[in-house]
Each structure stands twice: as structure tokens, then as C-alpha cells.
Amino acid sequence: MQLTKWLIASLPVLAMAGCAAKGEKTNEKDIKTLPVTELIATDTMFYRSYVANIQAVQNVEVRARVSGFLEKIYVDEGQEVKKGQLLFSISDAEYSAELARAKAALTNVIAEAKAAELETGKVKLLVEKKVVAATELEVAEARLAAAKAKIDEARSAEANAAMRLSYTNVRAPFDGLIDRIPLKTGSLINEGSLFTTVSDTRQVYAYFSVSETEYLHYKKSLANGEDAYRKVRLELADGARYAHIGEIETVEGEFEENTGSIAFRARFPNPGKLLKHGASGKVKLRSELEDVVIVPQKAVFEMQDKNYVFVVDKENKVKMKNFHPQTRFAHFYIVESGLKPGERVVCEGVRNIRDGMKIEPKPVAMDSLLRS
């Protein structure tokens, strides 16, 4: 009876011991083998991204310079045009009549001036023969001068009428692309009405803003003769890289008070007319840093808006560690603070482990990660 009671009392203890033994075997069996890399300090070059506004080198509004009815549209929206090509015509009957009147008025004053010139010649002969007083000649010459002045006035009126008539034919100011045409044939046009916009997109400007720190870094690089910093890349709205490299041409004269940034302007060739006026993208500006710690992006996980890695200690146990990134490039973070060279971090599979776990490290050289 006593033996039976002892066996019953011992069963839970034996069961717990068996479970513990079994658990220990399971833990040993479940140790994960994970890639681990040792952090190093290195010099690196990367490209910073800035939101860019794309604008045509020339983008001009085509507006009416005279009023009238829109008689004909010779082009379509999105069409390529050449400098001087006829785009629109306005009814010109009124301006043709105005030019005809101006020409008639010019002919009339020329005839009056001719008569005044002949009269002056006659008076001059009479004065020489002392038939009339010299004052008569002065009066005749004054009339001739007035007639010649009228000729100049009439010629100016004729030129103005001819110019206004020419404005009824609206031509392209340069080679470019036609934008939207809001008016239709027969529309009443007032002076200053917008016909369309013409954009020359054979080359485009990319405007983007950088911080004061980055601006100073850029200027120092140029002062050191590093002209490569003028070269910039462009990432399109769909994430694709633009095929042509641009060059920074100029920087604005002052910083924006609210943001503390300053605008740069880069020029990009656009032979295929892929880039349009008003498009968006990201300019990639080259930047170099010396002796910085970098950590692979796959090694990093976020928790409550903070960045962490798993650091591996001498006993191959992992421990969460917070760090502050300076920036990100490619598949790496540049560390501002929190991590130092020589520390080992799990560089892949961080979501499958927890703080305090023991792992089997699989060493991976940082150089190989940088090359991949």
C-alpha cells in the first residue's frame, strides 16, 4: 500500500523530468543557423534622392494680339511644330480694310507733299526775282515740311495696320510641341486670349531643393575640383532610371525661409521627347561619406517607429539593439549612432528569432554583401 502511494506521488515528478529532458533535446535541435556579418567602417558613395519638377527649357503661352473670330485651326494638340509654322488664323477683313485705308492716306499725303514741293520751287524763283517777299518762301517751306511730316505719320500708320493684319495669322515662336487648345473654330477672340502653349522639350530643366548642409557639401566638393558632383541622374515617376545623365547648371540666390532649403536646376537632354513639361521624378545627387558604419537593410526591423538589429554576443545569443540611421542607400543603412565596427549582427531572417535566443552563426563577409 505504501509502495503504491509512493509511485502515485512520484509520477508527476517523473513526468516533469521527462518533459524537461525532452525539451532540452528540442532546444538543442531547434537552434537556427543564420547568416551573421561583422560591421565595419568604410568609405562609401551613394546617391541622395530629391523630388524634382520637370520643366521645358522653353514653354510659352501663345496669345492673341488682335481681336476677331477664330477662322481656322491648322494644328492639333500634342503635335510637333516648327518655328514660324502657321497655327491659327483670325478673321482679317477688318484689318485688311484698315491697311487699305492707311495705304490710301499715305498716297494722298505723298501727293500733297509733292504739290507743296512744287509750290516752294515757284515761290523761290519769285523771291530770287524779287517779285514776292522772302517771308513767302518761309511760309512755303513750312508747308512742305508739314507735308513731309504727314508722310512719316502715314507711313507709320500703314506699318501699324500691316502689323495688325499680320497678327491675324498666329505662328509658332520656336520648334516645339502644342499643348491643349481650349478654343474652337468660330470662337470670338479678344486681345490677350490664350490659344495654346508651345513647349520646346528637346532639353528639360529639373528643379529640386536641398538642405543647407547638403548645399555646403556640394560647394566644397566643387571647390576641391570634383566636377563629377555636377552630374546627376533622374528616376522617373514609375521608378525607372532615365537613360541620360543631367548636369547641375545653377543654384538659386537665397534659401527658402520656411524650409531652410535652396533650389538647384539641372539640365537633361531629351532626344526621345520622353520627358514632358510639368512631369515629376526624383533627381539622384551623388554624395560621399568617409569612415561610416553600414548595416544591411535585411538586418533591420522596426518596432514602435524605431530601428533595431539583433546583435550576436560571444555565446552566440542574440540581443535586440536600437540604432539611429543617417540615411539609406541601395540595400544598406548608414549608421548615425547606436552601432560600432566589430559588432556582429544577424543579417537575414530576423523575423524568425527573438531576444535572448541562441543561434548558430554562419559568417558572411560585409564585402560580399556590398558586392551583391
Image (cartoon, rainbow, N blue to C red):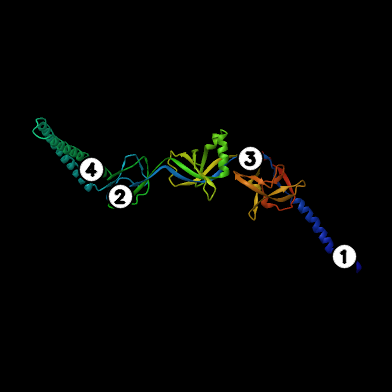
Distance from disc 2 to disc 4, alpha carbons, whole Å, reads 20 Å
CB-based contact (under 8 Å), mark 2 and mark 3: no
Identify the secondary structure beneath mark 4.
Answer: helix
Residue 262: percent from the left, percent from the top? 52, 45
Q: Which mark is residue 157?
A: 4
The answer to whether 30 appears left or right of 202 in the picture is right
Q: Position of residue 96 (x, y in %)?
A: 21, 45
Q: What is the C-alpha distance between the residues marked 1 and 2?
A: 111 Å
Disc with the residue nearer the chain's start (1 vs 2) = 1
Lower sequence index among marks 3 and 4: 4
Residue denoted by label 2: 191
Along the viewing direction, whichever of 113 and 369 lies nearer the viewer: 113
Rendering coords of residue 308 (x, y %): 67, 50
Q: Which residue is mark 1?
A: 7
Mark 1 burial class by Cα count in 10 Å: few <14, some 14-19, many 20+: few
Tag 3 residue: 370
